[in-house]
Amino acid sequence: MKLDRIMWGIVLLFIGSVLLLENFNVIEFYWGSVWRFWPIFLIIAGVNILFSKSKSQVGGYISIGVLVVMLGVLFYRGTQVPQSEKEKNFSMEFDNDDDGGDVKMQSFDLPFDDAAGKKTVLNISGGGTSYTLEGETDSLFTAAVKNKGAAFSLMNNLQDSLRTVTFKMNNKKNWNMGEGGNDVNIHLNTKPIWEMHLNMGAGEINFDLSPYQVREFNFDGGAAALDIKFGDILPIADVRIKTGVADVKLSVPTNSGCRITTKSGLSSKDFEGFIKLKDGIYETSNYSTSTKKIFISLNGGLSNFEVKRY
């Protein structure tokens, strides 16, 4: 019995079923309520480690049973309406207007100037949000935000030739991934060399970074969905992904040599076009000969990692 595959399949079935029931308005699931119970996945991973080596059928049944019970607890907690949500729904009922009630629009525009030098650090934080990179802009950074109960802020700091741009959610208590929730559309300038740091609990990220000079891309989050496309403009790019329960899809150009280093517990891995050197290390066939290289570090618990070449 391939215990890891069975347990990963049960987790995916649980998440998919919850999302499907939400889409059909059968249940309302509050992801923010369950995220504070993330240590449950440490318990699941520990039970799996205890019984996976013994290859005992009884041990396998125990591991699966613990997983099902824990997911049942998460489902129960996730369907309970938080007190803060009750109060927010009450205000929505009476404060609704022609502009969408609690739904607010924000826009940010940071002009581009040569004083920033060649390198710009971009920090993005805030969960329960869908972030989309819409394309290029003549400004340094622009963002159009549709938010529900949460406000975002933009800070700009210039020291010597290094500019740091920080875009964050101010009130994390109002995370909302449902209809009318938080949606952020971002535009970036292609001239700077970017170092990106994204930090969130739950959320979605869809970035096509192929036209940009991205030297570093760092993501640290929990229950997230990432779809990131990288380019080959710079000779070296470092990509570091650290997740809890996430669906991570990365696209890298065939012209670049690529090395993947993984540290994952029960995660699923699909690295098409890569050669496995040893446990946790994969390379493309042109890694040693290519003048451009991408280094990818993947660290996750119960995640799905997919890296493809284009």
Image (cartoon, rainbow, N blue to C red):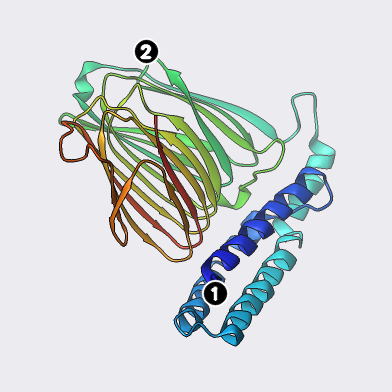
* Residue 127 position within the rendered picture, expressed as x and y whole percent measured from the top left: 54, 47
Tell me which amino acid carries mark 1.
Ile
Circle 2 crowding by C-alpha within 10 Å: few under 14, some 14–19, many from 20: some
Which quadrant of the figure contains the C terminus?
Answer: top left
Q: Picture quarter containing residue 148? A: top right
* Nearest to viewer (mark 1 / mark 2): 1
Question: SS for tag 1?
Answer: helix
From mark 1 to mark 2, how far is it between C-alphas? 48 Å
Which quadrant of the figure contains the N terminus?
Answer: bottom right
Residue at point 21% right, 40% down?
287
Tell me which amino acid carries mark 2.
Asp
Q: Picture quarter containing residue 167? A: top left
Position of residue 16 relative to residue 286, above or below, is below
Q: Picture quarter containing residue 110? A: top left
Would you say residue 20 is visible in this rendering? yes
Q: Give the residue number, with chain letter if any, for mark 2.
A: 138
Question: How many numbered marks, from 0 up?
Answer: 2
* Residue 226 position within the rendered picture, expressed as x and y whole percent measured from the top left: 49, 42
Would you say residue 36 is visible in this rendering? no
Q: Nearer the viewer, residue 293 or 73?
A: 293
Which sits earlier in the primary sequence, circle 1 or circle 2?
1
Residue at point 68% right, 52% down?
16
Q: Are marks 1 and 2 in contact (CB under 8 Å)?
A: no
Q: Is residue 306 left or right of residue 57?
A: left
Q: Nearer the viewer, residue 299 or 137?
A: 299
| Residue situated furthest top in the rendering | 138
Question: SS for tag 2?
Answer: loop
* Residue 223 position within the rendered picture, expressed as x and y whole percent measured from the top left: 54, 54
The dot on residue 52 is none
* Residue 130 position within the rendered picture, expressed as x and y whole percent measured from the top left: 56, 37
Residue at point 77% right, 52% down?
28
Q: Give the residue number, with chain letter if any, for mark 1.
A: 44
